[in-house]
């Protein structure tokens, strides 16, 4: 499990951008605001596409 804050910092996303990514991919963090490594990779891939657009 990875912290959302760590994922946000690693991908250099704003809180708004992180929210867009999570909403568009329907990612639901657990009660400690952690997501799986697979979801972290999905956000990284989304970020790459988002920046190219």
Image (cartoon, rainbow, N blue to C red):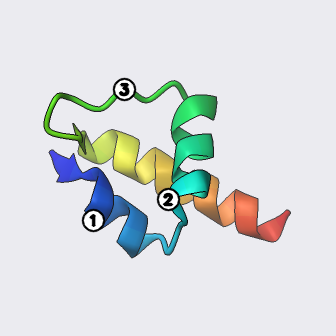
The answer to whether the residues at label 2 and label 3 have Cβ atoms under 8 Å apart is no
Instruction: Locate residue 53: give its quadrant.
Output: bottom right
Please count the marks in the image.
3
Which residue is label 1 attached to?
A: 6
Horizontal and vertical percent position of residue 41: 41, 52
Which residue is label 2 attached to?
A: 44
Horizontal and vertical percent position of residue 32: 14, 38
Label 3, residues with CA under 10 Å away: few <14, some 14-19, many ≥20: few
Horizontal and vertical percent position of residue 30: 20, 29
Q: In this view, does 25 lie to the left or right of 6?
A: right
Label 2, residues with CA under 10 Å away: few <14, some 14-19, many ≥20: some
Horizontal and vertical percent position of residue 2: 20, 52
Looking at marks 2 and 1 on the same chain, the residue that comes earlier in the sequence is marked by 1
Q: Is mark 2 on a helix, strand or loop?
A: helix
Residue sitting at x 30%, y 60%: 5
Q: Is residue 49 left or right of residue 1?
A: right
Looking at marks 3 and 1 on the same chain, the residue that comes earlier in the sequence is marked by 1
Which residue is label 3 attached to?
A: 28
Give the CA separation, mark 3 to mark 1.
Answer: 16 Å
In front of the other: 52 or 3: 3
Residue sitting at x 33%, y 42%: 38
Q: Is residue 17 left or right of residue 32?
A: right
Give the CA separation, mark 2 to mark 1.
Answer: 12 Å
């Amino acid at each position: 499990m990875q912290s959302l804050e760590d994922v946000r910092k690693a991908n250099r996303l704003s809180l708004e951008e992180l929210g867009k990514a999570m909403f568009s991919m329907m990612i639901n963090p657990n009660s400690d605001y952690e997501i799986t490594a697979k979801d972290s990779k999905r956000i990284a891939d989304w970020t790459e596409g988002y920046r190219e657009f």
